[in-house]
Image (cartoon, rainbow, N blue to C red):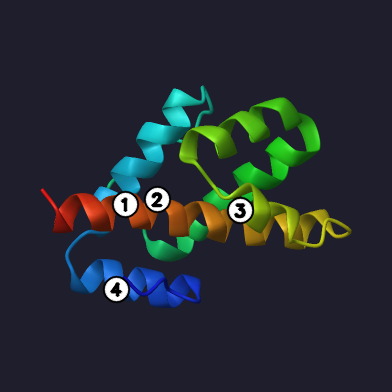
Amino acid sequence: MQMPMSFDQLITEANQLDLYKKLVFQLNKDFKLANIDLDLHEDVLPSSLKLLLHETIFKLIQEKFTEYLNLLYIIDVSESQVRALDGEDVLKLSEEVSFLILKREWQKVWFRNMYS
């Protein structure tokens, strides 16, 4: 599996493999496990998905850091990848973490689709 290098590339691949709805479902599932209110409709537009995820991560970093860390743990985002990000600009950091979350969720959906 070649990991997507951008949000657009990830969404394009998800749509090509008809797995976009499963990606949204996986996001909803893991956010619910972390007790974070992010109830995305299965037909959410990719641009809205990106915006809502970014906004949610930004708020978590700013206001609920413990819940943010718990979410990263539940989703299983690589700690080394998060540590490698520049934390000076919280807006940019939240955007980059959002993409790491999407990549990890995409990995789960892709593997489940390929090997089940």
Residue named by callout 3: 54
Return the disc, 3 or 4, that comes first in the chain's sequence: 4
Point 33% across, 42% down: residue: 26
| Location of residue 36 with respect to 101 vertically, above or below | above
Task: Compute the Cα span from label 1 to label 3.
Answer: 16 Å
* Furthest-left residue in this view: 116
* Residue type, numbered disc 3: His
* SS of the residue under disc 2: helix
| Tag in front: 1 or 3 | 1
* Residue type, numbered disc 2: Glu
> Which quadrant of the figure contains the N terminus?
bottom left
Asked whether disc 1 touches disc 4, contact meaning CB atoms under 8 Å apart, the reply is: no
Point 55% across, 60% down: residue: 99
| Tag in front: 2 or 1 | 2
* Residue type, numbered disc 4: Glu
Residue named by callout 2: 105
Point 40% across, 50% down: residue: 105
Q: Nearer the viewer, residue 2 or 46?
A: 2
